[in-house]
Amino acid sequence: MLRIHFTGEDLARTRIASGPDVLWEALLSIHMVQDRSAAQVTPASADFARWRRAVRPGISAHLREQAPLLGDLAPPVGYSADFLTPTAGSGDMESAVDAVLSTPRLHLQRDIGRLAAARRPASGRLALLSEGDPRTLGFLGHALHSYHRIALAPYWHHVQEQIAADRAVRVAALAEGGTERLLAGLHPGARWEPPVLVLAYPRSQDLHLEGRGLILVPSFFCWGMPITLREPGTTPVVVYPIARRSGWTGEEARGTAVPDPLVTLLGRTRAQVLYELTHGCGTRELARRIGVSDASASQHATALRQAGLVISQRSGNTVHHSLTGLGLDLLLAGGPWATGRAPRPAG
């Protein structure tokens, strides 16, 4: 069991992440892509089985060298390295991977030491990674970006949309019954025994919040039970599985998912840029999402900015792009999100 101990201050400081966390989705989907045991018993498990079949060829073709490192850091059973998930609710892969690569050496050694204790002594790239070797860190960053491009990016609009729907339900529960009602309904296996939230968990663990509050992160690829970090960090996190609609792995999931009228108006690439900027991202991340060079992504964003559809803000060497109100209105008017199911831009 996982027992989370709240104070009155913790209840006041508990919040729901604004959207999916790209690193948690990467970690949990890496667990799932390695797991061959999930039988097609329910529509949800059948969807994930189809997803595994769809993404494994790309992983085999493009991640031959990197996949073993990802699997060693995030095995399907047992402990996974805490440093792989330093963010909570961040959908920007570029900055999220930068946070992973900035992990202090002591934390790398701690987490990889735990992995080694559970299985076998760290060797090869894991040993180099535990020492903070710059080339191995770069190798890991490339692996995370490549994995995201192959396994997550083609399905990310489904992840965003379904998590937005779950978050709306949680916010309503919070408004109607307060934090205690939100916590009690977090998962079918959750029990609220004031001032402790009890969750089914593979090991016995007590988490004392001590006034830091709690971030609840809804997750698409979380399967079965909620999960937390071994080391809670500045603000502890609980990642919980959402209720998913079936059918998200159909052929349309691997297409552009951009409305045809928008393609006619803007052209396919710029329509895709508009869609990908629903939650905003940097130029490099945008380039990876749509499969073009950084320079080309910048040109497309510039054209949309000049049309009043996109706003770009510079911070140091990074330019972050997001939709304007006009850009969002155009996106909503062009496709099946006109019913109000589309996620709003962050911020």
Image (cartoon, helix red, strand yellow):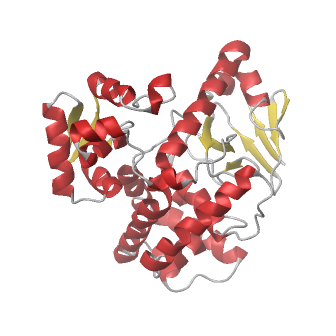
Q: Vertically, is 15 above or below 115?
A: above
The image shows residue 74 at horizontal and vertical percentages of 60, 67
The image shows residue 84 at horizontal and vertical percentages of 52, 59
Residue 287 occupies quadrant: bottom left
Q: Vertically, is 78 above or below 21?
A: below
The image shows residue 312 at horizontal and vertical percentages of 21, 36
In the rendered structure, the answer to whether residue 119 lies left or right of residue 15 reads right
The image shows residue 113 at horizontal and vertical percentages of 61, 72
Q: Vertically, is 45 above or below 346?
A: below
In the rendered structure, the answer to whether residue 295 lies left or right of residue 346 reads left
Residue 68 is at least partly visible in this image: yes
What residue lies at 72% left-to-right and 67% top-to-bottom?
77
Residue 80 is at least partly visible in this image: no
Q: Please state which of residues 265 and 52 is positioned toward the viewer in this rendering.
A: 265
Q: Please state which of residues 14 and 323 is positioned toward the viewer in this rendering.
A: 323
Residue found at the far top of this picture: 176
What residue lies at 24% left-to-right and 44% top-to-bottom?
270
Residue found at the far bottom of this picture: 124
Quadrant, the C terminus:
top left
Q: Please state which of residues 55 and 313 is positioned toward the viewer in this rendering.
A: 55
Q: How many marks?
A: 0
Q: Vertically, is 110 above or below 158?
A: below
